[in-house]
Amino acid sequence: MPLPALPSSLDSFDLAILAVLQKDNTTPQRLIGEAVNLSAPAVQRRIKRMQQTGVIAANVAVIEPAAVGQPITIFVEVELESERTELIDAAKREFLAAPEVQQCYYVTGEADFILAITVADMSAYEALTRRLFFDSNNVRKFRTFVAMDRVKVGLTVPLPG
């Protein structure tokens, strides 16, 4: 399946810079410049532009959950009682506010949301289900899938080229 066309604001230098940053966003701009054949100031300008335009959404450290006492990953399908706009927006706010929710997608199909959740243990997950699902008048049902193994986890976006 071909990738969509590039936004006109991104060129091959930008893509090369993004490829380096996706592997390690602490790479010094001088080294990025050497890798992509640009000066460090040119790399700095391009990174700043991509941050300002939202191409680079965040610069974060990816933490191993088990190393900080959060070894259980759970995926949850959530089906709402009503799909009225204000109720969908309220659910989005609830999921956004829960630190245990690592990812939240509003989806098509039977479920309305798919959540990726990280917790310390099943009692923490039970407490979360009470807060997010059982105490909500708008959650019709939810299905839980506990991950047995983290085979691949990442946020790297495939880049053309």
Image (spheres, rainbow, N blue to C red):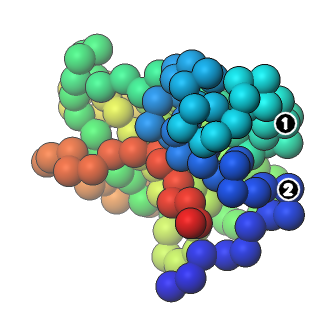
Q: Position of residue 72 (x, y in %)?
A: 23, 34
Residue at position x 52%, y 20% in the image: 26
Residue at the location (42% across, 27% down)?
A: 62
Is residue 63 or residue 75 the one in the foreground? 63
- Residue 5 at least partly seen: yes
Residue designated by label 1: 49
Please state if 88 lies on the left or on the right of 18 as rendered: right
Q: Secondary structure at mark 1?
A: helix
Percent across and percent down for residue 39 are 72, 29
Q: Quick check: 134 above or below 141?
A: above
Mark 1 or 2 closer to N-term?
2
- Whether residue 132 is visible, yes or no, is no
Give neighbour class at mark 2: few <14, some 14-19, many 20+ (Cα, 10 Å).
few
Q: Give 14 or 131, whichever is nearer the viewer.
A: 14
Q: Are marks 1 and 2 in contact (CB under 8 Å)?
A: yes
Percent across and percent down for residue 141 are 44, 60
Residue carrying label 2: 9
**In the picture, residue 68 is in which quadrant?**
top left
Q: Quadrant of residue 28 in the image?
A: top right
- Label at residue 22: none
Residue at the bottom extreme of this rendering: 1
Say which residue appears at 76% left-offset and 57% top-offset. 11
